[in-house]
Image: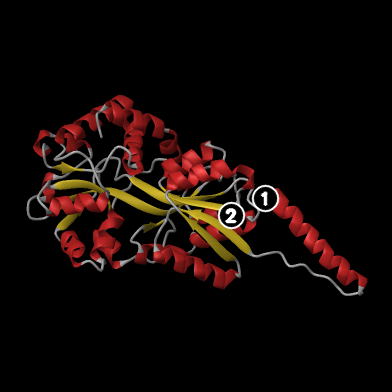
């Protein structure tokens, strides 16, 4: 148990101090410079960022990787005995669940407040957005004219019947998209939208965002709802088939004349009771800084949260776009209602 290990460590240190004191030697017991990270991010580029953090600060990053919901359950099970200091995951819906479960602690940092816009962090400091993902419409260049595309609501138009592809209702990305519609237009209209999407599906939802892109290439549908960064990863893939699929797709940012395109985040929060909370904050601050933010953009094709961070050629090629300005905290709070709406709409 964490308490037992702590007691043993203190006892061992005391023994060393006692022995040295008996010999009249000066004693300094250095604190261990470490931060224990639980993360669902599985990118080699992230490991390089953590290595750069260690080189700059001397703080070692011990990484435990896993699926988001599994890590949340692990934190619940471990409770106060957890070794975790920092939790990083994709989507505000999961960050909100971790916060509501009492797994995170409020954090104050002038650096994080300066680097991360208000709407991309929890107002009491329970979690902070580290990257942005835009959920857009991707289309077959040879079968869809961009002039046919406009808003999320337009995807329910009968002209798209049998042509639309999207992943399942269990996708937290879709849940948070619906949560944004709840915040903008109310639950009833959000439900009507979900029902309209179901009516226009080319097939039952399945797979991830890359699978929707591949289904377009296979002719199963003409348009899909996807996160932009998946296309960047496909275009730079070592698999020539993935590259070919991505090259045949166009990207459209919905609602540019209205509320803007829906964005979500990958983000993190300090674990409640963390033994190395200060180091966890230092890592969060590093991840919100120029070096890490530019790496996120250039290697994983996620939009930086830090204004002015160097972007990638892929992101620049997508052009400027208007994003929703909703507080992501409110979207996390609306997650349960979004799940209910998806279920009632028959979204599998």
SS category of the residue bearing label 1: helix
Q: Residue at x 83, y 64 (%)?
A: 15
Q: x, y percentage for residue 40? A: 43, 53
* Structural crowding at the residue carrying mark 2, measured as other residues with C-alpha within 10 Å and reported as few (<14), some (14–19) or many (≥20): few
Q: Nearer the viewer, residue 64 or 226?
A: 64
> x%, y% of residue 178?
32, 36
Res 345 → quadrant: top left
Q: How is the image coloured?
A: secondary structure
Tell me the crowding category of disc 1: few under 14, some 14 to 19, or many 20 or more residues within 10 angstroms, Cα based: few
Question: Which x, y percent locates residue 340?
Answer: 34, 28
Q: Is residue 12 at least partly visible in the picture?
A: yes
- Circles 1, 2 touching at the beta carbon (< 8 Å): no
Q: Which residue is mark 1?
A: 2
Q: Circle 2 is placed at which residue position? A: 110
Q: Secondary structure at mark 2?
A: helix
From this viewpoint, is residue 309 visible? Answer: no
Asked if residue 282 lies left or right of residue 168, the reply is right
On screen, residue 96 above or below 46: above
Instruction: Please give the name of the residue rendered at 52% of the width and 36% of the height, measured from the top-left corner.
Output: 100
Q: Is residue 130 left or right of residue 164?
A: right
Which marked residue is nearer to the observer: mark 1 or mark 2?
1
Name which residue lies at 24% across and 29% down. Answer: 346
Q: Residue furthest left?
A: 143
């Amino acid at each position: 148990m964490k308490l037992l290990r702590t007691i043993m460590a203190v006892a061992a240190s005391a023994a060393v101090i006692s022995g040295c004191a008996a010999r009249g030697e000066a004693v300094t017991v250095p604190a261990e410079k470490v931060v224990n990270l639980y993360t669902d991010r599985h990118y080699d580029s992230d490991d390089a960022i953590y290595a750069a953090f260690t080189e700059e600060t001397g703080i070692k990053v011990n990484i435990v990787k896993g699926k988001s919901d599994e890590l949340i359950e692990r934190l619940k099970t471990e409770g106060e005995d957890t070794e975790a200091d920092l939790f990083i995951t994709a989507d505000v819906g999961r960050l909100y669940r971790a916060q509501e479960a009492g797994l995170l602690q409020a954090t104050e940092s002038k650096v994080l407040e300066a680097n991360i816009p208000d709407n991309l962090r929890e107002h009491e400091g329970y979690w902070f957005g580290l990257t942005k993902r835009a959920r857009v419409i991707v289309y077959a260049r040879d079968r869809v004219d961009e002039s046919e595309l406009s808003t999320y609501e337009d995807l329910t138009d009968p002209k798209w019947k049998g042509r639309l592809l999207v992943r399942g209702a269990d996708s937290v990305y879709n849940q948070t998209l619906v949560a944004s519609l709840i915040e903008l237009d109310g639950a009833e209209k959000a439900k009507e939208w979900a029902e309209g999407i179901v009516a226009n599906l080319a097939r039952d939802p399945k797979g991830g965002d890359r699978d929707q892109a591949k289904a377009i290439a296979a002719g199963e549908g003409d348009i899909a709802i996807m996160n932009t960064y998946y296309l960047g990863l496909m275009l730079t893939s070592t698999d020539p088939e993935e590259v070919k699929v991505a090259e045949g797709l166009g990207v459209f940012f919905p609602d540019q004349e209205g509320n803007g395109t829906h964005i979500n985040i990958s983000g993190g929060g300090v674990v409640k009771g963390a033994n190395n909370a200060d180091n966890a904050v230092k890592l969060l601050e590093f991840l919100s800084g120029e070096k890490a933010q530019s790496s996120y953009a250039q290697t994983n094709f996620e939009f930086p949260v830090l204004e002015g961070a160097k972007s990638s050629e892929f992101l620049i090629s997508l052009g400027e776009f208007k994003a929703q300005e909703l507080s992501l905290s409110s979207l996390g709070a609306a997650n349960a209602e979004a799940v209910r709406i998806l279920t009632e709409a028959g979204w599998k």
